[in-house]
Amino acid sequence: MQQGYLCLVLHAHLPFVRHPEHEDFLEEDWLYEAISETYIPLINMMDGLIEDKIDFRITMSLTPPLCAMLSDPLLQDRYLRHIWKLIDLAEKESTRLQFQPAFYPAAQMYENHFKMARYVFEEKYGRNLLNAFKKFQDMGKLEIITCGATHGYLPLMLNKSAKRAQIKVAVQDYTSKFGQPPRGIWLPECAYEPGDDQLLRDEKIRYFFMETHGLLFAEPRPKYGVYAPIFCPSGVAAFSRDIESSRQVWSAVEGYPGDYRYREFYRDIGYDLEYDYIRPFLHNDGVRRNIGVKYFKITGKVALGEKQPYNPQEAKNAAAEHAGNFLFNRQKQIEYLNGFLGKKPIVVAQYDAELFGHWWFEGPDFLNFLIRKIACDQDTVKMVTASEYLKENPKNQVAVPAASSWGDKGYHECWLQGTNDWIYRHLHKIQEWMNELARDNQNESNGLRIRALNQAARELLLAQSSDWAFIMAMGTMVAYAQKRTCDHINRFIKLYTDLKNNSIDENWLQEVEYRDNIFPSIDFKVYL
Amino acid sequence: MSNDKNDATFSGSSAGSSPKGTPSTGTQGYVDRGGPLPDTYNDTLIVLLPRDPQWIFAYWEISDKTREEVKNKYGANILQRSKPAIRVYDVTNVNFNGANANRSFDIFITPEAKNWYIYVGMPKRNYCADLGLLVDDGVFITLARSNVVATPAGGISDIYDEQWMLVKDDFEKLMKLSGIDKIGASSAEAMRMLTQRLESILAVSSKGGSGVGALKPGTKKGFWLIADAELIVYGATEADAMLTVQGKPVKLRPDGTFSLRFAFPDGELDIPIKAMSADQSDSRQITIKAKRHTK
């Protein structure tokens, strides 16, 4: 008998990184790697489930910058160039390793994997993976939710209209891409402060996800802890994360991805193979980096040089084992909670989508086994989307969630600390200027000025991505994050100044529009 | 803010850096951090942001115009007679008018400082701050007043809901089930996990790996030798012929040449190479046998 629900939520996000001005741009690899290693494996998993008539429910946030990149022709072309190169390399590797039984299965696996990725990307879904996700949503298996327009960190925006624009632009973008308005949202970095829910309500969003303590520390006390949503005073539902299901997957010590049979992330042929051989597959600068072909397993606590060969079949068995263990734990948890609460609990398991495949190579296999086991092996746990849950459980406690985020220490410190606090005075200033521009030019009819105003809105949004502050805090690739912050702010300031002086530099504007082409149909009056 | 920003806004190329979240292996080459941002916006203001249940952040700016006005009003030596300070007000449940705060305290700031992290120590309270000058005689001259911020709750609410009340023991049990004792360790989870794993690898590694197949140069103390072998097979045929090596099709270069590289472990290697003419009327085969024996 069904005793509770499992709501699986995958947050898929990458910052908007698109540099048409460079033939070869390192940071664009984030997208290409995520496509090959995460998005396509997840799509294949869902297609396989549908083919085998396995019922499932997944919730996925596809953020507006990610949607913009997945549907961008330039990046689509570049992805194909990237994957063809990998296919070429994988073929060479299959030949090179064919007499080494310890490595050959992995070499073949990569060859198949890249060829399949190319086929699914180009032929099956016509270069635009949003077609796949939309298909699953239209079939009722996947619920796609939105996020802030550029993943802007809401509690650190001073001004309400800046927050509102992040939500409004996201909802418009979602509606244009998926043919219906979003029912739910993943707040950027799960960052919430009381009152933000009203902005969601204004855009007809019915629910959002937050970090565990956002709900536990709600006022008044939440009767069911994190095992039922609450309604904010605005009427928007807040769901929050179950820590146990997170830890089983995330923890460096106890987490599944650290199992010795899984693929070792840190042994990559970009570093391992002879330079002349691997050079054609590196970036133009010739610096050795990860390529995404890795032949060793985690093995245990040993030096990189002592890692043992990776065995794809053994790793797959481990994923099946872990899926069984995960499900067993959820069953026990849900049975216990059901008895304790006297109602069907909802266990919300929230993860970064890129964990599955990119970081944890076997992650998509794990999900695939898990979903099949849920469907076929038991009936205690039922997969559910937040919308379905609310339909079946329309009565929930009313409370105000607590300010929180899923960042380090649970509040705003990750995005507000010595490495990145300098950005806020500039961001707040250009927010204020954007409001001024919108107010003073709301009846503008000159086409060129309207273009400049819309571009100013894009630059402001791009500068607000929480990714830049996060990268500065993490300490890797800091220069790129600093540059993106400064570039968008400087572009905004020039647009503002030119609009004030009525001296718009059309050539320059055209170049900026060409580079920062996110949200082609944005209307600057969203800042009114 | 003139047109010379033009170049700054377009500066740059790909900085040398590692893929998302990979712990840095050092950056190479030209690093571009973007054009400089304005030092000042000529405002006089103070802004507060919440950081966590105990701390708030303040940044501020004092314009030259404000400085002049203060000098005109309070005397040319006012800046020498006073210390710059921030007065922080607890304005929880108060419609603040400058005089009705629940409590307040002052923080002296250095003249060069542009921002400050302020310990307030109280969750779920509202704060406001004045940027000003504390004059020797105890008078506080306000230059700017901030927005109001609320610190996060940071703990379980002590407010019960009649309709939804749960007995205390049960509630505590539920909180524990919900994982309240494990809160605050979630961000950048993948990054943290990977970083910890990398650290554990580095802890047992003295150096990175070597080539696939023939590993281990061993320790590099004193005199040493590393040797390994791979096999390169190459040749040429008619440019439009179909070539297979070990039964697998191989793409010819436009001039009909080809070159393949094989891992070559100890043992024997059989490499049949077969070319078929484009009209499939003729074919040639060469088989290369190679044997490796490492001592």
Image: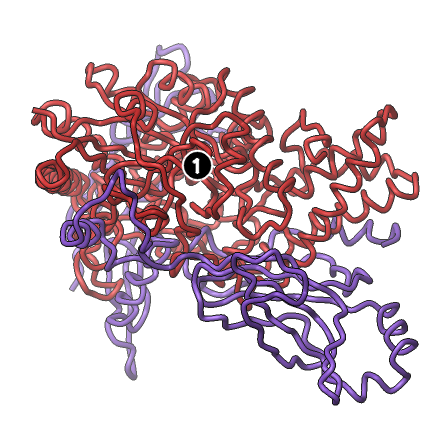
Measuring from the top left, give residue A22's x and y in whole percent: 65, 43
Measuring from the top left, give residue A390's x and y in whole percent: 31, 25
Residue B265 at least partly seen: no
Q: Which residue is mark 1?
A: A233
Residue drawn at 11 percent across, 25 percent down: A2
Q: Quadrant of the N terminus of chain B?
A: bottom right
Identify residue type, mark 1.
Pro
- Give the left or right position of residue A333, taking residue A205 as reference: left
- Give the left or right position of residue B48, taking residue A256 as reference: right
Chain letter behind tag 1:
A
Using the image, determine if residue A436 lies above or below residue B217. Answer: above
Using the image, determine if residue B177 lies above or below residue B240. Answer: below
- Give the left or right position of residue A52, taking residue A221 as reference: left
Using the image, determine if residue B7 lies above or below residue A109. Answer: below
Measuring from the top left, give residue A342's x and y in whole percent: 12, 35
Q: Which residue is at the front of the view, A281 or A351?
A: A351
Coloured how? by chain
Colour in which chain A is drawn = red
The quarter of the displayed image where residue A89 is located: top left
Q: How many callouts does the rendering have?
A: 1
Q: Which chain is purple?
A: B
Residue drawn at 88 percent across, 38 percent down: A504
Q: Which residue is at the front of the view, B189 or A102?
A: B189
The quarter of the displayed image where residue A236 is located: top left
